[in-house]
């Protein structure tokens, strides 16, 4: 199923040009018509062009009429320009059928869109690190991407780790899925770009953050009243964790999860979601209504066709 994919760089400059080229070739090999933004390879300091250049790239992606607008890479750069992004223009492009896909720094734009317009975007792959991976693109990621491309995707599932075998939670219905990169999300707290989602499913992931930093961000969200009003918190993959030998003394991500569970009590904290800075990542509709249930250790997260493509989301920004 040939689709028009528009590739643009709203955040950091592309460092690994070989991976970018591999990613473009892979998308073409999958049968897609790939259009590359004129400034996709631009460089200004650490960014893919200065702020004005990247804002223009976002506008071109919205005007492209493409089926999918895919980020070249994440990094850092979107929080700098959140107060200048034309949200209504992007939301209108989404309404007309352009699916915006990305991860990492893209979390900033995704949640800002939910806060400002209720528009749904997809947490998913980037061109370089995912489609252009040296070992080849991940099969599950590509299958999930194909589900989006073909309009077949109606949910995802995963198996919780063995340590959570006894975790029980009531099925979740009609909850807004939101979140993404924990560090980027936390940086939006207290701004107009942080979604006021009540009774939602919040998913989080991060990379190269020590467990104490993860805990501190979670405490900030908890004390700000965000975590306690969700229906569930879902941990994706937290990669690149390096403990301090002889100092952490057993303090790790499990400790952080256990303490969060003990302090939230009424809000289930699930782990093991295949999403984050990892090759095997599912695609997740940020801002869409979802249902979630478990059978033993198997968790099912369902959005269905109706959910992911209904654009009357006024629930998240009506507060």
Image: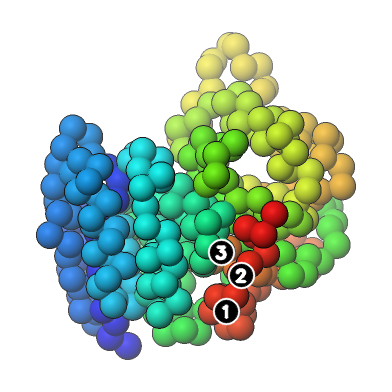
User: Quick check: marks 3 and 1 in contact, CB under 8 Å?
Assistant: no
Give 191 or 175, whichever is nearer the viewer.
191
Figure check: 103 above or below 293: above
User: Quick check: marks 2 and 3 in contact, CB under 8 Å?
Assistant: yes
Instruction: Tell me what residue is drawn at x 42 percent, y 59 percent.
Output: 87
Name the N-terminal-most of marks 3 and 1: 3
Relative to residue 267, is residue 300 drawn left or right?
left
- For disc 3, the neighbor class at 10 Å (few under 14, some 14 to 19, many from 20) is many
Q: Quarter of the image for the C terminus: give it.
A: bottom right
Instruction: Classify mark 2: helix, strand or loop.
Output: loop
- Whether residue 80 is visible here, answered yes or no, is yes
- In three-dimensional space, the C-alpha distance between marks 3 and 1, rounded to whole angstroms, equals 10 Å
Query: Which residue lies under the disc numbered 2?
Result: 313
Relative to residue 232, is residue 205 drawn left or right?
left
Find residue 269 and report its horizontal and vertical position in percent. 74, 47
Give 16 or 226, whichever is nearer the viewer.
226
Find residue 15 and report its horizontal and vertical position in percent. 19, 42
Query: Which residue lies under the disc numbered 3?
Result: 118
- Whether residue 13 is visible here, answered yes or no, is no
Q: Which residue is situated farthest in the bottom direction here?
A: 1
> Which of the 4 quarters of the picture holds residue 11?
top left
Instruction: Tell me what residue is drawn at x 47 percent, y 84 percent.
Output: 151
Find residue 265 and report its horizontal and vertical position in percent. 87, 42
User: Quick check: marks 2 and 1 in contact, CB under 8 Å?
Assistant: yes
Instruction: Tell me what residue is drawn at x 15 percent, y 54 percent.
Output: 39
- For disc 2, the neighbor class at 10 Å (few under 14, some 14 to 19, many from 20) is some
> Which of the 4 quarters of the picture holds residue 264?
top right
Query: Which residue lies under the disc numbered 1?
Result: 310
Instruction: Tell me what residue is drawn at x 66 percent, y 16 percent.
Output: 249
């Amino acid at each position: 199923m040939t689709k028009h994919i528009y590739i643009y760089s709203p955040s950091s400059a592309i460092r690994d040009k070989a991976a970018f080229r591999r990613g473009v070739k892979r998308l073409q090999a999958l049968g897609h018509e790939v259009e590359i933004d004129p400034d996709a390879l631009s460089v200004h300091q650490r960014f893919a062009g200065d702020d004005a250049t990247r804002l223009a790239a976002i506008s071109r992606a919205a005007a492209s009429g493409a089926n999918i607008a895919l980020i070249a890479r994440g990094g850092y750069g979107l929080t700098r320009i959140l107060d200048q992004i034309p949200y209504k223009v992007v939301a209108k492009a989404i309404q007309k059928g352009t699916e915006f896909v990305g991860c990492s720094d893209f979390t900033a734009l995704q949640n800002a869109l939910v806060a400002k317009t209720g528009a749904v975007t997809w947490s998913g792959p980037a061109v370089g690190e995912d489609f252009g991976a040296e070992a080849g693109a991940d099969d599950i990621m590509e299958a999930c991407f194909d589900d989006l491309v073909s309009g077949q995707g109606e949910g995802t599932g995963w198996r919780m780790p063995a340590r959570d075998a006894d975790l029980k939670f009531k099925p979740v219905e009609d909850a807004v899925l939101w979140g993404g990169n924990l560090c980027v999300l936390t940086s939006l707290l207290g701004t107009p770009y942080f979604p006021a989602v009540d009774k939602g499913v919040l998913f989080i992931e991060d990379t190269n953050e020590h467990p104490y930093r993860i805990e501190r961000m979670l405490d900030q969200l908890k004390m700000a009243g965000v975590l306690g009003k969700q229906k569930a918190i879902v941990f994706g993959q937290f990669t690149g964790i390096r403990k301090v030998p002889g100092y952490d003394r057993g303090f790790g991500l499990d400790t952080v999860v256990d303490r969060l569970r003990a302090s939230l009590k009424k809000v289930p904290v699930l782990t093991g979601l295949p999403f984050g800075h990892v090759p095997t990542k599912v695609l997740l509709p940020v801002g869409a209504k979802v249902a979630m249930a478990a059978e033993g250790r198997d968790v099912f997260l369902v959005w269905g066709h109706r959910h992911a493509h209904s654009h009357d989301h006024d629930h998240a920004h009506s507060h």
